[in-house]
Image: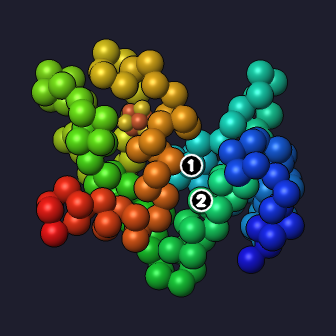
Amino acid sequence: MQTSKMLEFSDDKPLFPISTAAKLLDISVHTLRMYEREGLFIPFKKKSSQRLFSKSDIERIECIRKAIKESKISINGIRAIYSLIPCWEIKHCAKKSRDKCPAYWEHTQPCWSYKHEGNDCENQKCRECNVYNDYTDCGKIKNLIKTLSGK
Ligand code: SF4
């Protein structure tokens, strides 16, 4: 793992351009862009549209890579796992908002992939949301489900 190169930086500060992020992750820029298109992560975007990555972003993508390479989970599988995060419970969405929210009804993509105008989280930036930030790997999602089910 190459994150030790970055230990001196604060975790959430967007620092690395996409080429550096790709190098740190040992993948191509093309692959990184594809993960973004698939909604697996949300990069920080400068006004110029240049993407920057933080140490947390790199760790998140490392986790995605591990799921793909070691656990043989497909990208669609990862999206489906993310879609199971019960964001409406975590954010305490009102029933009225939840009932018209695709993230509540669908199970193919993460909530942050949907437009959420008119919902309770309409003014929340997904990249800064605890739903996006706190459940980056399958173990954390499973622990969340255990907590919610009281077991
Ligand atoms: S703000 Fe974004 S990440 Fe948070 S619950 Fe809403 S859609 Fe999901």
Residue found at x 51% / y 28%: 125
Q: According to the image, label 1 marks what residue?
A: 41
Q: CA distance from mark 1 to mark 2?
A: 8 Å
- Reading the chain from its start, which is encountered first: label 1 or label 2? 1
Counting from the top left corner in percent of width and height, residue 18 is at 80, 49
Residue type, numbered disc 1: Phe
Q: Nearer the viewer, residue 23 or 89?
A: 89
> In terms of image quarters, where does ligand 1 lie?
top left
- Position of 117 relative to 69 (above/below): above
Counting from the top left corner in percent of width and height, residue 122 is at 39, 20
Q: Nearer the viewer, residue 83 or 38?
A: 83
- Position of 9 relative to 24 (above/below): above
Residue found at x 30% / y 42%: 90
Q: Quadrant of residue 144?
A: bottom left
Residue found at x 32% / y 66%: 143
* Quadrant position of the N terminus in the picture: bottom right
* Quadrant position of the C terminus in the picture: bottom left
Q: Helix or strand or loop: what does disc 2 sit on?
A: helix
Counting from the top left corner in percent of width and height, residue 60 is at 59, 59
Q: According to the image, label 2 marks what residue?
A: 60
**Farthest bottom residue?**
70
Asked if marks 1 and 2 touch (Cβ < 8 Å), the reply is yes
Residue 60: tell me if it is visible.
yes
